[in-house]
Each structure stands twice: as structure tokens, then as C-alpha cells.
Amino acid sequence: MTRDTLSKHAFMWPAFLIVLIVTLFPLIYALTVSFQTVRIVPPMPPEYVGLRNYAEILESGRFWNAIGVTATIVFISVMFQYVIGYALALTLHHNVPGASLYRVAFLLPMFMAPVCVALIARMLFHPVLGPVNEFFTLFGLANIPFLTNPTLAISVLIVIEIWQWTPFVVLLMLAGLQGLPNEVFEAARVDNISTWRRFRDITFPMLLPLSIAVIFIRLIEGFKVIDTIFVLTGGGPGTSTETLTLFAYNEGFKKFNIGMASALSFLFLIVVILFGTVYLAAAQRLTRRYQ
Amino acid sequence: MENQLHKRIGLGVALTWLFICLFPLWWVLVTAFKPPLAVSQGATYIPFLDFKPTLQAFRDAFSGIRGDFMSPIFSSLAVSTVSTALSVLLGSMAAYALVRFEFRIKLLAGIVFAIIAIGGFIFTKEALGWSVPAALGSMMIIALVTSVWLNGKKLPGPIMKNDDVTFWFVSQRMFPPIVSAFALFLLYAEMNKSGVRMLDSFAGLVLAYTAFGLPFAVWLMRDFFSTIPVEVEEAAMVDNIGRMRIFFQIVLPMSKPGLVATSMIVLSFIWNEFLFALLLTSSKWQTLPILLAGQNSSRGDEWWAISVAALISVIPMIIVAIFLGRMMRSGLLAGSIK
């Protein structure tokens, strides 16, 4: 018994300590920094200013702009990811010819570095030399400034997010479809229920909990987006594509305003927690209504 | 009849997406072989027909004339393999403990931990003037010891069980990484000041990435372990074989497919990670994603060079994707979503 208690702790503690040291440890430090003014350039002795950093951020238009940009990119792209991903998972599940080839090909984008995807996108969406430009030229729309027009730049970023992360939805929804009991579908087929109704009345409700989880993961992951934007537009033109993470990075590493950047990242954390709570509560209601 | 139609629509959807998926990859593959002229005169797609392929870009990259490629490749390889190995090993151990033992953690002990850690840190740093690493380190240890001791006592309030511990691990991923990356940068900078080199070092990166990979490893491995029948282990226990030996000689070999899948997923996350590397490295230990991001500003129009760099970072991941695609067919990943 005692030996087992010992090994129980020996198994758990290394992982627990590492996560504690790397995440919680610095977090406490950053929390205290967020109530101070700390500047590296020009160096200033740290000084406690209470909630002033937070107030300043909440009053700045740039913060709300960053929230707006992040929300636009995340919500629109996740919506498309879910719809396209679900459709693809359904087709793969019903064994279209060559399914095993698709499976590998569909996974590929997810495993590429977002930085790398952004570099490729930069070539593809080049206003003069890129193939997308060539495609649009066919319709008489030559040299569209994809990355320098604010609306178009956001659209391009959304397209990239969809391209890269739809595979994630495919992967999980397909696994979910494969886990469904076959008998229900056999019965439905015998009763001659149409494919659409089979999906609406059986598949969709049964996979609703999984769908909610998948969308949740994608939304939370989407909020973190920085790499593609960092490479593709750098937040520009102006601050029209600046997301929250990029804003915090610029504040901390371009302006070296560390107190501000810490406060900003905590506000970001609060936004994510608030959103997550609301989402999960809404999701619970939705599932209950279906049951 | 209806079925036939559906099959055709399905095939159409799949083929369209296949094209969308593969076109950018094809583009980067052929661009790596393009001579400058084939880039500057508009889009070209097919080697030999549209342009004459050349290996010049690869030669440039590996001879090192155009910036150092080998050192980021080496640091990416070293950092991602070591941290993947560490996080899968430690994560499996924690996951195994979560499946086979019962944990009871009192909420009150956790709250006491937070109060001592935060309050003690502010007090020792501001009132006693300790350095940041010293204040944080000592308070962490005091807080940890106190809360572990308290946890053994009778306490009122809710008790957290194994599922809560798992949730705690997974919830680390819900944090926006800028929060911890930024904080970690500040802390590493402080440690550099007091003589322990953490910024732009192998140890600093591996520590950060091991913590980064651990939540996935714990979450995925827990599901794999819970499908392993407990009887084998019970038989070994009767023979008085220790838990450590049971774990390393019986349980781990039995869950090899799970280990491979988990390692690949964790490896891909670490290999592609950008934000931590951006903040925590400056020159010596820069990883591939940072090099790639730099390519963009340093050689905007030299697409062949950019493509070569992109290819180098993509190829290992293509191998990973092929592996996982195979596993997906065998339904191996189906278990991990429940």
C-alpha cells in the first residue's frame, strides 16, 4: 500500500511540477508586473500604478479594434471550418473512391507551420506574380491588392485559417462518425428514411456534443492566432489586421512597455475565460433541448 | 438512384477540396526549382514545360551563402525531439497515475497555495528586496509544501478528483499562450541577469516546450491507457513486481501505437511552434519557424529561396501526416475523443 502511494506520487509529480513551473510560476510574476509601469527603453525604475495600465488599455481604441479583428477572423473562419469539415467527414465516412488518399492529403495542412503557410499564401496572393491574381485576371479583375486593402487582407487571413484548420474538424468528426452505432442507421435504411432526414434526425443530434467540443477547441485555438498575421501583414495596413496576441507582442517588444503588455495579456485571458463560460453555458442549453 | 447521386456529390466535394489542399503544396514544391526568370514573369506551374527546373536554390541554401540554414535546422531538430520525448514520457507517467490511482485534492489547499505564492512573492520582493527568481522560487516551494501538508489534513470544502486534475492539465492549453510566453520571457530575462542562462538557450526552450506538450500527452495517453485491461498488471502485482517495472516493461510496450500517435502530434505542435521561439530565442537557438518568418522580410521576392526554406520545414511533417493518416484508418484515434 505504502509502496503504491509512493509510486502514485512519483508518476504524477514530474509532469505536474513542470507545468506548474512554466505556466503558473511566471504568471504570478506577470500579474504583479501588470500593476506597474516598467519600461526597458528608456530604463525606468518600476513603480506601482494600481489599475492604471488596465484602464488605459480599456480606453484605447486599438484594444477594441484588436478584439474586433480577432473575433471577425475567428468566428467566420471557424464557421466555415465546421461546415466544410463536417461535409468532408461525411463523404469520407461513406467511402468515396480513393478515400485513403484523401485522408492523408486532407491532414497535410494541419501539420504545416502556420508561418510556412503564410509564406506560401504570400506568393499565391501576390498582386502581380501570383496564381490567384492570374485566376482573377480571367474575369477581368487584374492586380487586386489582396494584402494591402484592409477588408481583403482580413479575408485572405480567414481563407488561410479555413485552409489550415478544416482538417482538424475532418479528423475529429470522422472519428466521431466511425464511433456511431451501426444498428440505428440500418433500421433507418429499412424504414426508407431519406438521407437528409437521416442526417438531421440521427447523425447530427448524436454528434452534437462532439461538434460543440470541436467548435470550442477551434475557437479557443483561433483566438491565439499570430504567426500567419505576423508574416503576412504584420498587422497592417495600419492596425486593420492586428489581433490581440499581435497587439500584446507589439506593445511589449516594439515599445518595450512591459507593464502594459502584461496587463493586456491578462485582459486577453479574462476575455477568453468569459467567452468560454458563456459558450459552454449556451452549449449545455442547446444539448438539453435536443434530448 | 438517390444513393448514386449522393456518391457523385460526395466525390465532387472531395475532389474539389483535394485540389484546394494540394495546390499550395504543389506551388511551393515547383517554386523551389524555379530559376529567377520563371518567377518574375508571372505564375508558372509545370516544370520542364513552363520553365527549366534548377537546383540552384537548394545549393545556395545548404552552402550557407544566403544566411545560415543548418543551425536553425539543428536547433529545431534537437529541441523538438528532446522536448517531445520528455513530454511524452512524463505525460504518460502522469496519465498512467490518473488512470490507475485515485487522487483527492482539496480545493482549500489549492487556494492556500495561490495565496501564499502570490502574497509571499510580493512581500519578499518588495519589502525584503529579494531578486525575482529567488523570491518566486522560495515562495513556490513554501506554498507547495504547505498545501501538500494541508491536503493531508481534514478540510472542509469540495474535493477535486482525477477528472479535475486532467482538466487542469488540459486547461493550460486554453490560456492564450502570449500570457505565459510573455511572463516566461520576463522570468528568463531575470534569470539571465542573475547568471543562469535561460533566454536563447537549449535548456530554456526544452523546458518551455516540454510544458507546452505535456497537456496533449496527458490527455491523449490517458485515453490509451484506459483501454488497456488491468488484469495483466494485477497478475504482475501478485508476483510482487514494482509499479515502475510494470509501467516500463508491460504497460508502455502494450500501448506502442498510442505512444507513436501521441509523439507525432506533440512533435508537430512543437516543430511548428512560433510564439515561444520568437520570444525566448534571439540568435543561437533560433528555430526553423523563426528563420522562415525572417525570410519574408529579408528576401521578399526571391521566391525560390523562400520555397526551399518552406519545404525544409514541411517535409518532416508530411511524413508525420502520412503516418497518422494510416492510423486514422485503423480507427486508432477514435478512442481519444470520448
Image (spheres, grey):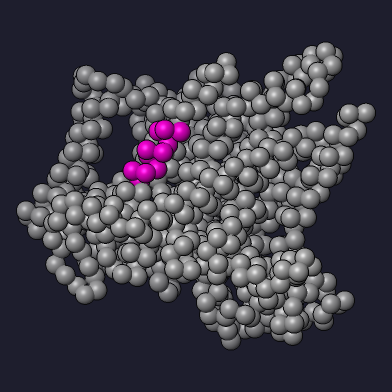
Q: Identify the residue shown where x is 22% and y is 19%.
A: B156
- Asked if the magenta segment contains residue A278, the reply would be yes
**Residue A87 shows in the view:** yes
Q: Identify the residue shown where x is 59% and y is 32%.
A: A211
Which residues are drawn in magenta? A269-279
Say which quadrant the C terminus of chain A sits in.
top right
Instruction: Indicate the quadrant where residue A40 lies.
Output: bottom left
Counting the numbered discs, the total is 0
Residue A247 horizontal/vertical position (percent):
38, 60
* Relative height, residue A273 to residue B293 (above, below): above
Nearer to us in this view, A103 or B246: A103
Q: Is residue B229 left or right of residue B321?
A: left
Q: Is residue A61 left or right of residue A72?
A: left
Majority SS type along the magenta span: helix
Residue B35 horizontal/vertical position (percent):
74, 83
Q: Residue furthest right?
A: B1
Q: Is residue B8 left or right of residue B157?
A: right
Q: Identify the residue shown where x is 23% and y is 33%.
A: B111
Instruction: Indicate the quadrant where residue B249 lies.
Output: top right
Residue B49 horizontal/vertical position (percent):
87, 76
Nearer to us in this view, B307 or B332: B307
Say which quadrant the N terminus of chain A sits in.
top left
Instruction: Indicate the quadrant where residue B40 lies.
Output: bottom right
Nearer to us in this view, A136 or B300: A136
Q: Identify the residue shown where x is 20% and y is 64%.
A: A38
* Relative height, residue A38 to residue B57 (above, below): above
**Residue B253 shows in the view:** no
